Amino acid sequence: MSEQIAQWVFGWGSLLGRPGFSSAPAQRATLMGMPRRPCIYSPRHRGTPEGPGLVFGLVRGGSCHGVAFEVAAADWAAVHVYLGAREMDAGIYLEATRRLTLSDGREVSALAFIVDERHAQYAGRLEIAEQLRLVRAGIGESGPNPEYVLETARHLQALGIRDRNLTGLVAALGGIDLPVAETA
């Protein structure tokens, strides 16, 4: 009989503050090769089809600092189903297994949701003025788009993470004081 082992989930956006599942205490983690960027049109959660908002995604190039959640093997099936329903409803994210480096130096394989750059909602690299326009105007089922951006920045700030892909957008929104910590 084989021993069941815990599974890991990488949190880099809304999972930072609202994971929605039980886990061991989250640890800071780094994902190499995929930065967090405001690059997904949101016609539902943070906007409408007529006025989409803009949300974050993991895309190629760079790195991303976030958190790793260790999920007990006994809970994994239910957590995996929950995350699939939460993250995959529009088809913009792809489920992938990626290597993370934990803050204690260990490397683990984790479930991460990355952008499908072929999807119609993929916005690509937008100039800060266009990002700001979309975010300021966006409001959807999950609330105002500026709230999402600023809440993500607050969670990163609490972790001591400064993300250069968010700094300009947060400042333009009249946001929060960001730490002068490491850069993603």
Image (cartoon, rainbow, N blue to C red):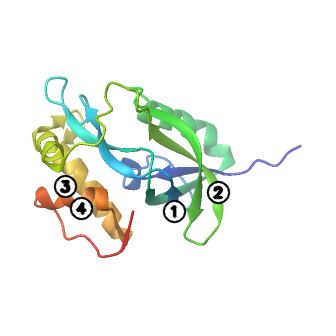
Dividing the picture into quadrants, the one containing residue 105 is bottom right
Quadrant where the N terminus sits is top right
Tell me whether the residue at label 2 lies in contact with that at label 1, contact meaning CB atoms closer than 8 angstroms.
yes
Q: CA distance from mark 1 to mark 3?
A: 23 Å
Mark 1 is surrounded, within 10 Å at the Cα level, by few (under 14), some (14 to 19) or many (20 or more) other residues, namely many
Report whether residue 138 is seen.
Answer: yes
Tell me whether the residue at label 4 lies in contact with that at label 3, contact meaning CB atoms closer than 8 angstroms.
yes
Image-based side of 142 in relation to 79, left or right: left
Q: Tell me, for residue 169, which label it has, or none.
A: 3
Height in image: 69 above or below 126? Answer: below
The residue under label 2 is 108
Tell me residue 49's x, y (percent): 19, 23
Q: CA distance from mark 4 to mark 3?
A: 6 Å
Quadrant where the C terminus sits is bottom left
The residue under label 4 is 167
Q: Amino acid at mark 3?
A: Leu
| Disc with the residue nearer the chain's start (2 vs 1) | 1
Q: Secondary structure at mark 2?
A: strand
